[in-house]
Image (spheres, rainbow, N blue to C red):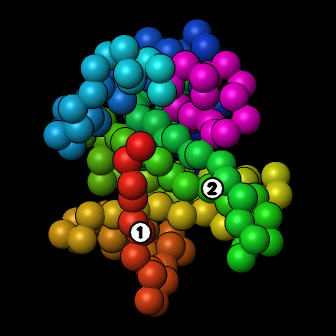
């Protein structure tokens, strides 16, 4: 893989937070800086429920991917959910996301993960094409549903 994936640590919080804020602004996700930090900091401090990876050079990352961990009886063990994937607009279209979405599942499978999921907007054909090229498939008869608590 030519795109470096770095497991983010606590001292990466400022870099990661800036990238997440850029993604949220681009996507219209309204969240306070405090709430964003509360969501990110535990991932960088070793919480066992997920991990954040910086993409590209460690000193000046060009994006990030966050995976949350779960458990699935149906899939026979640990599963994961790509919570967020973001690349700076200037580096899009270079195959970085494709590399990440091919390499990351392999690494997670080697660590025992049985399945990885993600969601995509129904009207985002570009992202759907990316996800399909990297092995993700819609599950017939299933639709992701959410209840905010």
Q: What is the x, y in percent for residue 18?
A: 34, 20
Is residue 131 left or right of 121 when viewed as pictured?
Answer: right
Instruction: Give the labeled residue for mark 2.
Output: 80
**Lateral position of residue 52 relative to residue 105, left or right:** left
Check the image and report above or below for 10 versus 136.
above
Q: Position of residue 61 (x, y in %)?
A: 45, 26
Image location (x, y in percent) of residue 128: 33, 70
Q: Which mark is residue 144?
A: 1
Q: What is the C-alpha distance between the residues marked 1 and 2? A: 14 Å
Most extreme residue toward the bottom is 140
Q: Position of residue 56 (x, y in %)?
A: 50, 33
Viewed as shown, does residue 114 lie left or right of 83? right
The residue lying at 21 percent from left, 32 percent from top is 30
Residue in the foreground of this view, choosing between 59 and 114: 114
Q: Secondary structure at mark 1?
A: loop
Q: Quadrant of residue 5?
A: top right
Judged by depth in the image, the label closer to the viewer, 1 or 2, is 1
Which mark, residue 135? Answer: none
Residue in the picture at 57% in, 34% down: 52
Q: Which residue range is magenta in the image?
A: 40-54
Task: Name the quadrant of the C terminus.
Answer: top left
Q: Residue at x 40, y 32 (%)?
A: 62
Within 10 Å of the Cα at label 2, are there few (<14), some (14-19), or many (20+) other Cα atoms?
A: many
Q: Who comes first in sequence, dot 1 or dot 2?
A: 2
Residue plotted at (34% across, 73% down): 129
Residue 76 position by quadrant: bottom right
Q: Are marks 1 and 2 in contact (CB under 8 Å)?
A: no
| Disc 1: CA contacts within 10 A as few (<14), some (14-19) or many (>=20) | few
120 left or right, relative to 132 = left
Q: Is residue 60 visible?
A: no
């Amino acid at each position: 893989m030519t795109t470096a994936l770095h497991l983010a640590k606590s001292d990466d919080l400022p870099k990661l937070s800036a990238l997440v804020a850029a993604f949220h602004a681009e996507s219209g996700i309204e969240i306070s800086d405090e709430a964003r930090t509360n969501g990110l900091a535990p991932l960088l401090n070793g919480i066992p429920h997920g991990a954040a990876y910086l993409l590209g050079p460690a000193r000046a990352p060009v994006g990030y991917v966050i995976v949350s961990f779960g458990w699935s009886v149906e899939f026979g063990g640990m599963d994961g959910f790509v919570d967020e994937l973001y690349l700076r607009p200037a580096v899009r279209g270079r195959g970085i996301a494709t590399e990440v979405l091919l390499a990351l599942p392999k690494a997670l499978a080697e660590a025992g993960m049985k399945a990885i999921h993600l969601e995509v907007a129904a009207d985002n054909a570009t992202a759907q094409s990316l996800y399909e090229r990297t092995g993700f498939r819609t599950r017939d008869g299933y639709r992701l549903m959410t209840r905010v608590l």
